[in-house]
Amino acid sequence: MRPEIAVAVNGGSSLLGLLGTILPLCLASAVSPTLITTQSLLLGGRGGRRSAVAYTAGVLAILAAAIALVFAFGGSFHLPTEPKLGSGTDLALGVLLVLLAVVLQLRERRRAAKGTDAHRTRTAPAPRHVEGLGGAFLLGVVTMVVDFTTLALVVAASEDVISSSAGSGLDALAVLVILAFGALPAWLPLVVASLSPQHGLAWLQRFAGFVGSHGRLLGVALVFLTGLYLVAQGVLGLV
């Protein structure tokens, strides 16, 4: 086999292997009831698409900052030569998320026992009162900062990229994939509303209403399942 063909084959195999490693984490990070509900409500508000674009930029800014921190500190720990370090981090993040899910579920039960609206979400009324593009950007930043599940998945996927030693070109491509999936609940409603302004926006509003009614339950389930996945991945990497 000629050298250039061997390089191409090895590069393709490395890319497929890397994508196969991070894809489950990326798919899980693309499920965020809070992000998609907030974005849907923004699209139906006064700012419309402009506010939605600013909101997406805020989400992307936090995701990019999280990935940059992982690469900065991960590089200093030499993760490529210490594969068990990434597995230990996955295990720790998974345990924290499982505990967080348990705490959230216990809080929901106490609220239900007190007769409060257990399904009310904190983000539902806020987007309609966002002032200007700066306010929408800040809302995206804050929403992403408190979305612990998505951030944990993005951190875990970024660690896998560092540990893969696939090369700078493939690393950059993997980072773009992680960003695209992590911010998907923010940019996908914007794309849907742009392609079909009437029907798309109506569908998004109905979906936002559904998530608004069941958002807390979906959030707790997502946190719990994500935690279990990271625990399993961490344990398998340590043994």
Image (spheres, rainbow, N blue to C red):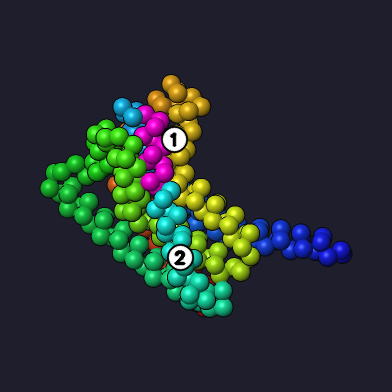
Main SS of the magenta part reads helix
Mark drawn on residue 189: 1
Q: Nearer the viewer, residue 206 or 150?
A: 150
Q: Amino acid at mark 2?
A: Val
Measured as percent of width and height from the top left, residue 182 is found at 46, 50
Looking at the image, is 51 positioned above or below residue 150?
Answer: above
* Residue furthest left in the image: 114
Measured as percent of width and height from the top left, residue 93 is found at 39, 66
Q: Is residue 58 magenta?
A: yes
- The quadrant in which residue 206 appears is top left
- Disc on the earlier residue, 2 or 1: 2
Mark drawn on residue 70: 2
Q: Is residue 217 visible?
A: no
Q: Amino acid at mark 1?
A: Pro
**Would you call the spot at circle 1 few (<14 residues within 10 Å), some (14-19), or many (20 or more)?**
many
Looking at the image, is 230 positioned above or below residue 190?
Answer: below
Specify start and end residues of the magenta stretch as a single range: 48-59
Measured as percent of width and height from the top left, residue 211 is found at 34, 39
Residue, x 38% and y 46% (percent of image)?
Answer: 58
Secondary structure type for disc 1 = helix
Q: State left or right for residue 10 relative to residue 145.
A: right
Q: Is residue 112 magenta?
A: no
Looking at the image, is 210 positioned above or below residue 81?
Answer: above
Secondary structure type for disc 2 = helix
